[in-house]
Image (tube, rainbow, N blue to C red):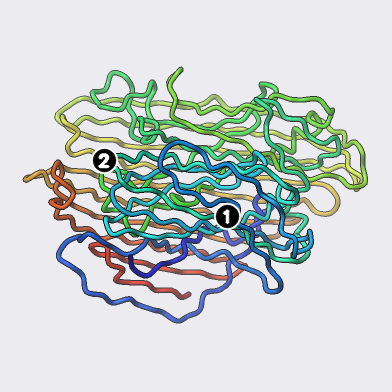
Amino acid sequence: MRSRIIMSMLAGATLLASTLLGVTPAQSATSAQSTTSADVPAEFGTDWHDPVTAAPPVTKPGGKSCEVTVAQAQFKDFTPYVGTYAPPHDCADRWSKVVLRLDGKVKGRQYDRLGYLHIGGVEVFRTSTPQPSPDGIEWSVEKDVTRYSDTLHGTQPVEMLIGNVVDDTYTGIIDVKVTLTFYEGRPDTAATPDRVLTLRGDTLTTPRNSERVVAEVYATGSGGGCEEYWYMTVPDPAPYSCKAGDGPYREVQIRVDGQLAGIAAPFPTVWTGGWSNPFLWYVVPGPRAFDIKPIQYDLTPFAGILNDGRPHRVEVSVVGVPEGQTGWSTPVNVLVWQDAHSKHVSGALTKVKVSDPANSSVYTPGTEHRLDTEGGHRLTVAGYVNTSHGRVATTVSRALANTSVHTWVDGENPDSLKATWTDNETVTVDGRGPARATRTHRTYTMDGTTTLGAGDRLRTVLTLGDRAAVTETRGGRRTEWSRLDDTYTGDATYTANVPRDQRHAVGTTRERYRLYGSGGCYDHSLTTVQGVLTEDQSGC
């Protein structure tokens, strides 16, 4: 194991202190640059640098803090860890921030595995694991979980699972410890909800004085089947190993009492065994692979309906998955802000406007098979609530689009995909004072090719992008803005169909994470060659 480094992921997409997630703005990076120079072997050996990412660390306030261990376990099979969480005794009951940290280690031979952590039934963390070296690796992940403070104020049951298989072939036991660090201080009430709720079956009952309601869905396509690679699936007539009805277009929808309430593009996560080439991910994982961000839906237009004290159906589905086919997990948390001066907040849903969904995949046969996909959808919902501080109207508009070109020849060699997903959202809140609007433009990209050449040399060249632009306005004037660009590139080759020690692998990976705007600047670049960290530069 070499140079143990903390894996840190933003809880939100941008520098803005997101009202949905309670993200603290990243601080400006220093202008200093540091470069790691190391001897690079001719090929991968039996050990490599511990996993590292270019994403910024979670900012932490000063002052008193307390740490609580939430889970400590070795995962050898599919038996969950079960325990009990108790809030800290020495940090009062008001916290300005709560930071989750996972420390993990594993050695031997093992696949990447997907895991979750539930506290009081609330999913506070979803993750995947790196693949180990024979000599062993260690890694850590940090996440801002302040928004779950309501759950963390009381004693709660804990369940954690990183499903794993250990046998004569796959020997890696995943050893993890999860802690929460609490920082005393005044919470940001705009970013921290009063209640964190989970569904009972598919029903939700909110407090009658809810004035803001946000659902978050940890949507992941996984499980080892074709939905793990949903972006490369093809319609039934095309000759390809992963078929899925109408093709690769996916959309995560949420409904309230059967009424479409939110739409979103899923992030095309690539796990650390993805694209048939683990050597791409041994040191630098793809964006979001270790800290899976939930999709957020602002359901405030439905608050007037939800506040009647009765249970309401809340259902999540993934468009494009063939009927009866599994492969997606969609756990739901609901964050609620209450009106402290009202027992009942009335209101109404005033508008639901839905476009006809677009989903076209055109297969063109030939020496090179080709699938061209175009999909998209638009939704606008609006409603109001009558609060103690006046009527507040909320309008949420979201527009999705996906284009992709998938080409392959017989035998799926080579196999290429170039795809772009956009998810543009505007939330406008009009009540006391000038109207406030938050516009978020998300863009996800994937451009890669896998080829099996002479001597069974398998090569994968891949670029992934996670980008977001956020602008906040008040009365039409910009008040805050940010831009995120997290880009990963990799090129790795190894000998397939031979024992591990005969793979003779080589590979170069890079990640650059840039985050800048009215809240500051962060710019961090990493480069690895044959598992050695050769560049580590920070500065704006």
Residue positioned 75% across, 51% down in the render:
153
Q: In the displayed structure, does residue 89 sit left or right of residue 500?
A: right
Q: Whole-percent x and y of residue 202?
A: 65, 25
Determine whether the residue tagged by mark 1 lies in a helix, strand or loop. loop
Q: In the displayed structure, does residue 343 sit left or right of residue 17?
A: right
Mark 2 = which residue?
168
Q: Report the disc number at residue 11.
A: 1
Amino acid residing under circle 1: Ala
Q: Residue furthest left?
A: 455
Callout 1: few (<14), some (14-19), or many (20+) C-alpha neighbours within 10 Å?
many
Q: Whole-percent x and y of residue 249?
A: 43, 31
Q: Whole-percent x and y of residue 337?
A: 78, 45
Q: Is residue 533 above or below residue 100?
A: below
Residue 423 visible in the shown view? no
Q: Whole-percent x and y of residue 4?
A: 40, 67
Determine whether the residue tagged by mark 2 lies in a helix, strand or loop. loop
